[in-house]
Image (tube, rainbow, N blue to C red):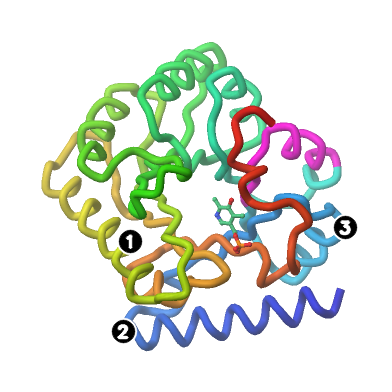
Amino acid sequence: MDTIINNLSYIHQKIDAACIKAGRPQGDVRLLMATKTVDPTKIKVAINAGETLLGENKVQEMRDKDEALKDHLVERHFIGHLQTNKVKDIIRYATCIESVDRESVAEKLSKELAKKGATIDVLIQVNTSFEESKFGVAPSEALNLVRSVAKYDNIKIKGLMTIGLFSADKEKVRKCFKLLKQIQQEVMAADIPHVEMKELSMGMSGDYEVAIEEGATIVRIGTAIFGARIYPDSFYWDESK
Ligand SMILES: *Cc1c(COP(=O)(O)O)cnc(C)c1O
């Protein structure tokens, strides 16, 4: 328990330091706890320490943890790969879907939201690392996708999300984040009605400081808070599981 609290305090110091280094105001960056595989007891320790935002990759897991977490004032984002047949369930638990990467998902989402008379925030996920194993719209198609998704009145686009290259070479990772920033500028210049581009969700345990230097407003951190996971991340990005 102490470990989680210590880890959080260390990460917040690092986030603040990265903001200062980048000449950005402290408080400019939100910490999203990536809580896949993490037990609600541990998540509650972090919430009691003051955390307000978490992200899950699987609808099933969001549902399973809902009972334990629903009385806690915590915002939940969906950060995993979206399947159209799960959309209906996701909107019950998430206030923001960070991983919209194709129009078919937006269409389904809009239909389900209309039934409830609800709206939802989304980020458009971009594949800035050009790795085949990663989801996200191709950078060259991002603007087009924003235009298509913006047509749905009940879907509020708030920005972009990416997963940087998994590499120890910080400069290669930095390129991914710079590309996302560049796409953000491009979308803003297009001035599409009802589209906000304030949020850039980028940076994980290994690269969040670089991401902050490049303009991240949300960093998604799991391992550095809760320790290593048993399952490889591919499990969480495999549609068949
Ligand atoms: C698991 C996950 C993270 C956090 O990864 P860590 O390396 O554990 O910090 C961030 N974003 C997404 C989309 C994830 O699936």
Q: Are marks 2 and 1 in contact (CB under 8 Å)?
A: no
- Report how far apart the C-alphas of labels 3 and 1 lie in the structure: 35 Å
Magenta region: 55-67
Where is mark 2, residue-wise?
23
Please report whichever mark, 3 or 1, sits nearer to the chain's N-terminal start: 3
On-image quarter of the N terminus: bottom right
Is residue 64 inside the magenta stretch?
yes
Q: Secondary structure at mark 1?
A: helix
Which one is closest to the eye, mark 2 or mark 1?
A: 1
Which numbered disc covers residue 176?
1
Horizontal and vertical percent position of residue 233: 63, 51
The numbered disc on residue 41 is 3
Three-letter amino acid code at disc 1? Cys
Q: What kind of residue is marked 3?
A: Thr
SS class, disc 2: loop
Ligand 1 neighbours mark 2 (CB distance < 8 Å): no
